[in-house]
Amino acid sequence: MPFPYEEFDLSGIRTYPLKSRQSKARADDFAKPYQPGSGMTGFLDSLPSILAASDFRAVVSAMVAARESGGGIVWGFGAHVIKTGLSPVLIDLMERGFVSALATNGAGIIHDFEIALSGATSEDVEATLGAGWFGMADETGRLLNGAINEGVTSGLGIGQAVGQYLCAKHPQYERASVAAAAFRLGIPLTVHIALGTDIIHMHPAASGTALGEGSLRDFRYFTSSVARLDHGVYLNCGSAVILPEVFLKAVSLARNTGRTLAGLTTVTLDFAKLYRPQVNVVSRPTAGIGHGYYLVGHHELLIPLLAAALVESSEKP
């Protein structure tokens, strides 16, 4: 049965006063023009209280509160954070008390180690792969594997082992190394490895025993740090798979042994929204007990901005 061509009758529609509606965007929450000379505080105050700007403020507040209360702040970071030149920013936050523990993947410790040795990292894969030279820097394969092998044999995790090696050898760019700074400051640094993913695994000095034992030891150290995060903060900066998976298991272990992680705040900072960082960091661990945030932006912009906000907020009278 076909319907007829018939205009809908609008004579009976109902309306309501605009001001009675609950609206998502309000003029009171809009941005304010930045005032010259007002500095980082003025910039933060100028942001709108809407969407990501509200989330950014909430993250800053949670981190300042965690620092003041001793709730703990654990930073997980992928290799891209090191490659985009952010080691000095992280080290400064470590020295200021905004870092309780650190975690990275295998690539992260490789780039940090190369920076410490030579002040440079991140080779051109396309230029070296065809000739078979990709990943074949002698010092990276020989010395980093050696540091891991020796340190793990003596009972250390991989992060401790590399930090100890660098602090003992004092390479030219030691001050730019997160691993060296962590060891110097007594801040736990754990390294979470997937075998076969990193260039040092291609070298004859690589030991499956040391890599496996050291990474498992670091997982248990990491879990111990996560278990302390009642009213604390966990940040996942630029790791799409390894660290979100490791964090989820650490949360499960902590809760299995009675730690509720009440008031936990989790944050992912990355230049795209991805599945595992969203569900394994932002959503699942905080469900019913805390808050999760996903801040999207380039690491080389977003992390210095966050660091500046933390420094400024912590120095307010």
Image: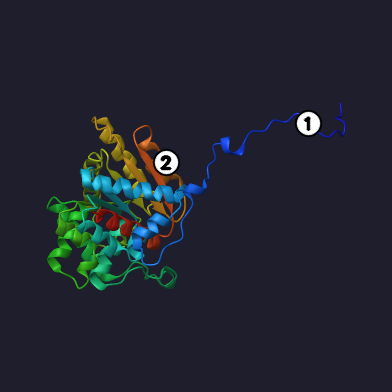
Residue type, mark 2 in image: Val
The correct choice, above or below, for 94 with respect to 175 in the image is: above
Q: Considering depth in this image, is 74 or 113 the residue closer to the camera?
A: 74
Residue 225: mark in rendering: none
The image shows residue 13, relative to residue 244, as above or below, that is above
Whether residue 300 is visible, yes or no, is yes
> Who is closer to the viewer here, 259 or 305?
305
Query: Is the C-beta separation of discs 1 and 2 under 8 Å?
Result: no
User: Which residue is label 1 attached to?
Assistant: 11
Query: Residue visible at 15% across and 69% down?
Result: 170
On the image, numbered disc 2 is attached to which residue?
279
Above or below for 176 versus 160: below
- Nearer-the-camera pick, 201 or 308: 308
Q: Position of residue 296 (x, y in %)?
A: 44, 53
Which residue is most to the top? 1
Answer with mark 1 or mark 2, whichever residue precedes in sequence.
1
Position of residue 67 measured from the top left corner of the image (x, y, whole percent):
23, 48
- Dot 2: few (<14), some (14–19), or many (≥20) neighbours within 10 Å? some
SS type, badge 2: helix
Residue shown at the point (21%, 57%) measured from the top left: 96
